[in-house]
């Protein structure tokens, strides 16, 4: 006679727990935002990674007064914010924004350079000190005060 052993639930439960522990014990993967910041540090000379608060990573560079990388907000997937220390930024500032923007948004450097230059140069007597424009599926917002100019480049979540 063949003995039939009853199905045991503790064996099934132990297997399920072991599988769950194996999945949870896998090494943690860094956030996509941190990966972009590390890529910026390795490919753009002079960028240093500062503090990370929430969804913003603060960066520093000699040609920018402020530089930050924002990730996955309510209305955008990535954001690059740069502030120059003068009302009319130097070409080195535009090169920095173009290099960083090309890495963050995965488009070519000349396109980011053209868009950021147009945005900053449009500010003036007729258009005022705040300009919003769209260029190559990027949203650019440029502002300036009496002593400095800033640009925020974002890409929407649906693009």
Image: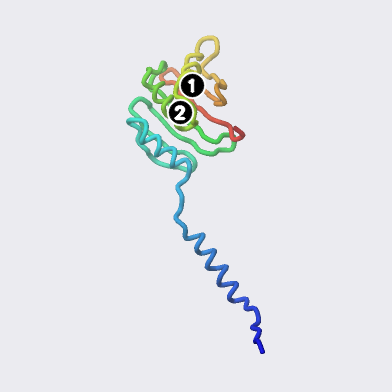
Provide residue 48's location: percent of width, then percent of height: 35, 36
Residue at x 50% of width, y 18% of height: 119
Image quarter of the N terminus? bottom right
Residue 155 in picture, x, y percent from top left:
55, 30
* Model colouring: rainbow
Q: Residues within 10 Å of mark 2 (few under 14, many from 20)?
A: some
Q: Position of residue 49 (x, y in %)?
A: 37, 38
Among numbered discs 2 and 1, the one appearing first in the sequence: 2
Name the residue that disc number 2 marks.
102
Q: Is residue 29 above or below residue 148?
A: below
Residue found at x 59% / y 38%: 74
Q: Secondary structure at mark 2?
A: helix
Is residue 121 shown left or right of residue 95?
Answer: right
In front of the other: 22 or 30: 22
Q: Nearer the viewer, residue 105 or 61?
A: 105
The answer to whether mark 2 and mark 1 are in CB contact below 8 A is yes
Q: Position of residue 53 (x, y in %)?
A: 45, 42
Which image quarter: residue 92? top left
Q: Residue furthest bottom?
A: 1
The residue beneath circle 1 is: 111
**Marks 2 and 1, Cα distance to the nearest angstrom?**
8 Å
Seen from the viewer's position, the closer of residues 70 and 38 is 38
Please say if 135 is above or below 157.
above
Give me the residue at 32% from left, 31% from top: 46
């Amino acid at each position: 006679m063949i003995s039939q052993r009853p199905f045991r639930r503790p064996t099934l439960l132990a297997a399920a727990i072991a599988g769950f522990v194996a999945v949870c014990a896998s090494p943690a993967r860094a956030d996509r935002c941190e990966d972009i910041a590390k890529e910026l540090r390795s490919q753009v000379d002079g960028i240093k990674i500062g503090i990370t608060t929430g969804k913003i990573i603060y960066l520093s560079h000699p040609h920018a007064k402020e530089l930050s990388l924002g990730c996955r907000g309510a209305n955008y997937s990535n954001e690059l914010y740069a502030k120059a220390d003068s009302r009319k930024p130097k070409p080195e500032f535009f090169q920095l924004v173009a290099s960083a923007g090309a890495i963050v948004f995965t488009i070519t450097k000349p396109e980011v350079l053209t868009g950021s230059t147009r945005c900053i140069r449009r500010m003036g007597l007729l258009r005022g000190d705040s300009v919003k424009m769209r260029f190559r599926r990027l949203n650019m917002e440029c502002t300036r005060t009496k002593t400095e100019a800033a640009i925020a480049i974002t890409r929407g979540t649906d693009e």
